Amino acid sequence: MSEQDMSGKEKTLFGKGLNPSNILPQKLTLESKIKFRCHPVVECFTACCGGIKIILTPYDILMLKKRLEIPAHEFLEQYTTPVYLEQTDMPGVALKLREDDNKCPFVTPEGCTVYTDRPSACRYYPVGMADFHEGQGTMGEGADHKDEEKFFFIVKEDHCKGFLEDKEWTVAEWRADQGVDVRDEMNKDWLRLVMRRKSYGHQAALSEQAKRMFFMASTDLDHFRRFVLESSFLDTYIIDDETLETLKTDDVELMLFSFKYLANALFGAEGLSIRQDKIEAKVAEIKQRQDDSVTQSISDYKEIKKARGEEVDPDL
Ligand code: SF4
Ligand code: SF4
């Protein structure tokens, strides 16, 4: 299905519909009260699980592939479709809707079959969160994120009858009930990468290699683990033994590590150390390239002088 067909039912990573007319013009805080309840007896039950683009975060993918007991590549192939994230050139995936009814592959008349592992976007609904506002120097270990501004809003769509229910919560209570806080904690460093990229606009394109790396680390941790353990990665980066052992077996730690690696590789953030000999080799390579280009330009200059029949300075 084309993106156009889904206009108004597409969500950003923060649960915000792209159709602004569905967003109530009210800035909410964690203490704001909302009246809403969703349960299996509501007349619109599962109406929100079709005709929608649900972007998956790395943690969503990790939880869903574990739930389904399949490797990441199989999950990606069977249940996802490629997308660009937040109108950037960063590649990601969304749930692939069923061809016959245009609904989420996990929805049944009885409800969501992966409910306890449902994606972050499903948990947010209908309380969206405003984008982070990232400034320079806010990535990597020890960075503070004071400049992130967070507020909430309600997405109210005609088909959703949950607003007619008689249950009142604060935004904080709703988020805790839906498990959003835990998801936010897991997703935050990855979201920062996306928002950092978004803040650059289209001024500087990501290289194809950088895009591939971002996609691999964000969607397929099995592949990323092989990259860390079986490529020249460990010859380049200094990783202590304890961390290395953890990365071999702990998927969540590996995912968090992948965000750190991407921040370093894509934006030069601190948090990973490169081996001294690799730095020296890189410096020598750059110097050699500079020396070669100087030699080439002198030789070109001599050729031009000769072609003009002019005398060439022997000291050149
Ligand atoms: S994952 Fe579950 S909650 Fe989310 S759209 Fe699919 S069926 Fe609905
Ligand atoms: S449309 Fe609203 S009330 Fe109905 S199932 Fe979805 S979230 Fe619940």
Image: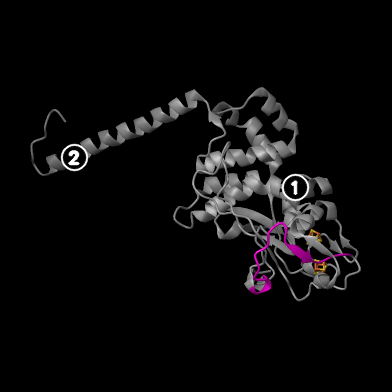
Q: Nearer the viewer, residue 135 or 252?
A: 135
Q: Quadrant of the C terminus?
A: top left
Residue 170 place in picture, x, y as percent: 77, 59
> Is 206 rendered above or below residue 226?
below
* Mark 2 surroundings within 10 Å by alpha-carbon count, few (fewer than 14), some (14 through 19), many (20 or more): some
Tell me which corner region of the image, top left, top right, bottom left or bottom right, holds residue 50: bottom right
Residue 89 place in picture, x, y as percent: 54, 56
Disc number for residue 156: none
Residue 302 place in picture, x, y as percent: 17, 37
Q: Label 2 amino acid?
A: Tyr
Q: Mark 2 CB in 8 Å range of ligand 1?
A: no
Which secondary structure lies at badge 1? helix
Asked if the stretch drawn in magenta spans residue 32, the answer is yes
Q: Which residues are magenta?
A: 21-39
Where is mark 1, residue-wise?
A: 182
Does label 1 or label 2 sit earlier along the sequence?
A: 1
Residue 140 place in picture, x, y as percent: 56, 39
